[in-house]
Image (spheres, rainbow, N blue to C red):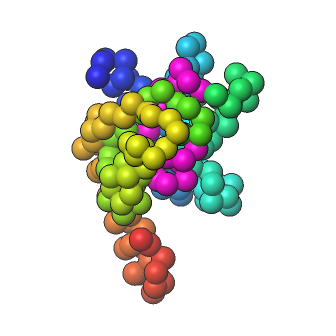
Amino acid sequence: MTASDEGYMRRALELAAQAETAGDVPVGAVLISGSLVVETRNEKEARGDATAHAEILALQAASQHLKSWRLENATLYVTKEPCVMCAGALIAARVRRIVYAANDPKGGADGGAFDILRSNATNHRIEVETGLLQSEATALLRRFFRARRERAESEGIEGAAP
């Protein structure tokens, strides 16, 4: 990985922190395709939309700007291992490369809970790199979910936090 990879991931972490401030799971994404730079963050709570993951929003914005669903030259930097929905969308969009920080053993699609991103059964292979700024991303996610659990416990809400 390069210094520019680290710079894009640091920006994704800043976007993740913005998502946290807005009450969403702290995931940020930066998609690069040529001179195009798309910056997104999770907005499920903000939009009331289960599909408003940072990765999906980045794909939508890039496709709209490039006027093509094919993102063969794109690299996506994301702070958490993509879920099944996002992995499927990344494969369908023909993204060239994904760099993610934190593993997601409960819902990740790169070997966390599922193994989709590197599966030989898919019609497109994505170059996947992991672990860049992993400790920072993991700490952000842990802090968010710890606070959510504590808030739910203090309010007596069962099942409010994963």
* Any part of residue 12 in sight: no
* Any part of residue 145 in sight: yes
44 w.r.t. 34: above or below: below
Query: What is the x, y in percent for residue 69?
Result: 68, 31
Residue at 73% from the left image edge and 29% from the top image edge: 64
Q: Quadrant of residue 144?
A: bottom left
Q: What residue occupies the far left of the structure in this picture?
A: 135
- Could you tell whether 66 is left or right of 131 in the image? right
| Tag count | 0
Residue at 37% from the left image edge and 73% from the top image edge: 150
Residue at 64% from the left image edge and 28% from the top image edge: 70
Query: What is the x, y in percent for residue 135?
Result: 24, 44
- Could you tell whether 18 is left or right of 138 in the image? right
Q: Quadrant of the N terminus?
A: top left
Work out whether residue 36 or residue 155 is closer to the camera in this orientation and state it. 36
Query: Is 80 colored magenta in this rendering?
Result: yes
74 w.r.t. 57: above or below: above
- Could you tell whether 139 is left or right of 156 in the image? left
Query: What is the x, y in percent for residue 125?
Result: 45, 34
Query: What is the x, y in percent for residue 110?
Result: 37, 48
Work out whether residue 105 or residue 21 is closer to the camera in this orientation and state it. 105
Residue at 48% from the left image edge and 76% from the top image edge: 160
Give, as a single range, the part of the protein colored magenta: 71-89
Q: In which quarter of the image is the C terminus?
A: bottom left
